[in-house]
Image (tube, helix red, strand yellow):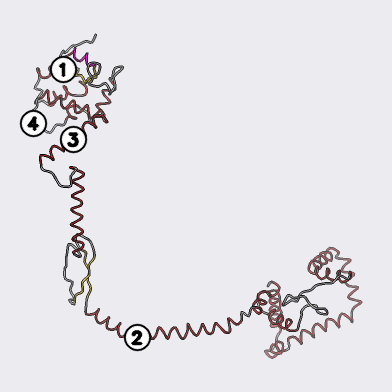
Amino acid sequence: MVKNLLKYYKVVMKENIIEKEWKSPASKKYYFNNKEKILKGQKKAKRDYYYRNREKIIADKKIYKANNPEKVKKWRRTWYNKNKEEIALKAKLKRGTPIIRECLWCLDTLPEGRTKFCSSRCHDQHKVYNKRLGPIWMWRLYSKYKIYRFFYNYLPKVKSIFVKKIPKFFKKIFLKFKKKLEKLKTWLNRHHMYCYKAKVCGHWMFYISEAKKRTERTRDFCSTKCKKLNAQQILENKKQRNLAAWGTEHRPDEETRRLIQNKKHAEWDKQKKIDDPGHKLIRRTRLRMKKVLGRGFTRRQRGEVSVYEQLGVENGAELRAHLESKWQPGMTWENYGLQPHGWVIDHIIPLKYFKDNFDLVNDLEVQKKAFGIQNLQPLWWLENAKKSAKLNYESK
């Protein structure tokens, strides 16, 4: 392919050079009509000049070789690399070894007396395809497998199918349904399609109206099927909710519900006390406050004051941390409230002192001092029993 491109480039360059020297279009026309004849004449003129001035040319060559030995060596090296195969063939011929040559076109072995092509047919084909762009092996396959049949026989048929027959077929179909399309267009111009969304099931519904203004339509369900499915879903949700809350598919009566809720709350409170000691402490302190302040002491009476505000803490964890910081050796949450070897929460200043000397039930500030975190400490059960309600008790 490179050789062919170089040949093409040389020919183009020569033609461009010649084009500059052309004086008239007649000379250009004469050159292209008699191109081979002109080139042969140029070769013959070169040969005649060589034979006339042979001795002078040889003498000039010798002088050039003597003056430029490096250039001559370089030229010989390049010439040898180019003609290496021919030199090897000549060497084999001198030795008398048989040379097997292949045809340049069909790649078969050449018979005796042939140098390049096995027949005139191969020579003609090589001459035709060698002038074309692309490598010679591509054109060899092109002619060997008769690929030209595809271009000259099948392509016109395919072209006729896609250009003539198929468009005609679609044209017939279009003409056939043209009237129906026109009818549909007139019907659409007269009728208008509207859509709206059902409220409950959320499905889109369409309706056709001849009126130009849209009529407002709102339905809960798109069909009776959706309505039945929604009713079934509501019943199923009720069953699941009752099972989760009461353990039965149907909602029980009020007394049964109260008993179940109390049982659930008792179980939850029991487990919460085990998991979170802070919750246990708050429960105990709240009961102690009720006992001291009276069972009728409700939130409405104390002005919506929470137990955390009376204790002076934000949550049970803060109360728990305060007591843990004052623990004596051997105190743990496992032995809290156990008799007689456990520990309990003790009021440093007894509650009796506040009850006797102040209005503990109605005064919030007094309640904060009595039940507050600063008045609480952990104390062993026996020590707490000995202390009782004494104000200045000293442990032995």
Q: Amino acid at mark 1?
A: Pro
Indicate the secondary structure of the residue bearing disc 3: helix
Residue behind mark 3: 265
Q: Nearer the viewer, mark 2 or mark 4?
A: 2
Q: Which quadrant would residue 8 be assigned to in this image? A: bottom right
Q: Nearer the viewer, residue 195 or 33?
A: 195
Indicate the secondary structure of the residue bearing disc 2: helix
Residue behind mark 2: 176
| Cβ atoms at labels 1 and 3 below 8 Å apart | no
Residue 9 % position (x, y): 69, 76
Indicate the secondary structure of the residue bearing disc 4: helix
The magenta segment is 380-386
Within 10 Å of the Cα at label 1, are there few (<14), some (14-19), or many (20+) other Cα atoms?
some
Q: Nearer the viewer, mark 3 or mark 4?
A: 3
Helix, strand or loop for the magenta stretch, by majority: helix
The mark that comes first in sequence, 3 or 2, is 2
